[in-house]
Amino acid sequence: MNTVVEKELKLKKELSIWQTTFAGIGIILGAGIYVLIGSAAGMAGSAVWISFLLAAFVAAFTGLSYAEFSSLYSKDEGEYIYAEKSFSKHIGFLVVWLIFFEGVVSAAAVALGFGGYFANLFSNIFSIPVFLVALLLVIILSSINYYGIQQSSWLNMFCTSIETLGLLFIIFIGIPKIGSVNLLEMPNGFTGISTAAALIFFAFIGFEAVIKLAEETKSAKKVIPKALILSIIITTIIYILVAVSVVSILDYKTLGESKAPLADVAASVFGSKAFLVLSIIALFSTGNTVLLLLVTTSRLTYGMGNEYKSLRFLSSVHKKTRTPWIAILLVMLFTAAFTLFNDITLVASITDFTIYGTFITVNAALIVSRYKYPKLKRSFKSPINIGKFPVLAFLGIISSLFMLFHLDSRVVIGGIILTIVGYGLYSLICRGSK
């Protein structure tokens, strides 16, 4: 196979600000909103929109830290560089170790969600195991990822447009109903709001993945910060409007018991045909999320190949497609392995542990960076500062800890075990191999 290492051949810089922003929107607007809004409404009541707003603030605090860092460094290693520069190579490796598993496990979980929708839609025609559909999806999308970043980007833009139209449709049919319910009704008080926010936060995860496209984005240090902020703002507006619409159409108790909440909302207005349409849109949504997770996780893996001699093989770039083929293959194999789990719910929940741990580390790294490298030119700077101290980064740490404490104890234990394994791996193959 014709390959060369990254030192001789670089990835193509082809992505514009809108393509990068669409990538952020596409991964944020993934499976979460189509699945979780029902459960969240059951917890928070008609005031579930407040939960989305709360989760958006948590995402924004950390998103602004990512934006500032991305204006300083434009490598696909992302969080590794941030943690390594502010703390140490060891902390950087541990963060990337957790993010890698967040990516492959999330991709597998969402692929299984795609398999479930697919199996249900075609159950009257033929029967196919959910895991097999998920496995085939991972292989097909990995092939697209291998073929080229431009192809992945155009497919993402198409799927993002479809899933966004589905959400805009829900907003449209809900407009005449707005005002028919008390949007401040909280059956479980603020506890219900905050618990729903912790759950809903999964629907915001993905904005940070934009930084892993830095080496394939034109003028990355200027474009990436803008794409991060735009993707969070646009998706927050859409989420809040969807939340207001769904509780205005269906009672929050009914939503709380629904396994396909948005499809049920559409069906309550237009009947079974609307249920079918929203289910198909959900296929585009889940498929798009899997594609973006495969792309960004493979770029992170590729980036780590440039950091350690023992992992140098991961930085191989294919001469023809100009994509990191070994990193893509590795991510595909790990994701495929996780699709074989019959019950991946608990395993997938560990992604929440990894993302909160990562957010805490990135925000702390920004605080340290402000004092450790005060003379670095920052083309974007997180707002609201006391001297050099970034207030929003501190709030990002506090809010992430708040979310972390809402996780199941088994998830926390699993996350700690995963971290210990990462520590051992660093000591075994990476220490001193730079």
Image (tube, helix red, strand yellow):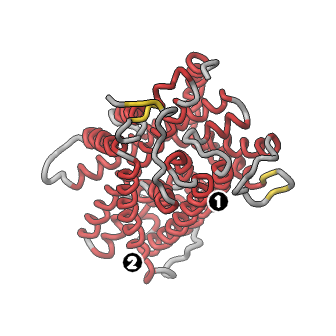
Residue 157 picture quarter = bottom left
Q: Image quadrant for the N terminus?
A: top left
Amino acid identity at mark 2: Ile
Q: What type is the residue that disc 1 sits on?
A: Phe
Residue 168: percent from left, percent from top: 42, 72
Q: Residues within 10 Å of mark 2 (few under 14, many from 20)?
A: some
Q: Residues within 10 Å of mark 1 (few under 14, many from 20)?
A: some
Residue at the spot x=58%, y=57% of the render?
Answer: 223
Is residue 56 or residue 18 the one in the foreground? 18
**For the view shown, which residue lies furthest in the front direction?**
8
Q: Which residue is mark 2?
A: 173
- Whether residue 64 appears in this view of the structure is yes
339 left or right of 177 in image: left
Q: Position of residue 119 (x, y in %)?
A: 23, 49
The residue nearer to you, when weighing 260 against 277, is: 277
Image quadrant holding the C terminus, namely top right
Q: Secondary structure at mark 2?
A: helix
Q: Residue at x 38, y 36 (%)?
A: 319
Q: Which of the pair 352/151 is nearer the observer?
A: 151
- The answer to whether residue 79 is above or below residue 27 is above
Figure check: 298 above or below 174: above
| Residue 346 seen by the camera | no
The residue sitting at 43% across, 55% down in the picture is: 30
At horizontal 43% and vertical 35% (from top left) the residue drawn is 317
Q: Secondary structure at mark 1?
A: helix
Foreground tag (1 vs 2): 1
Which of disc 2 and disc 1 is earlier in sequence? 1
Q: Pointer 1: what residue?
A: 57
- 333 is higher (above) or lower (below) than 321: above
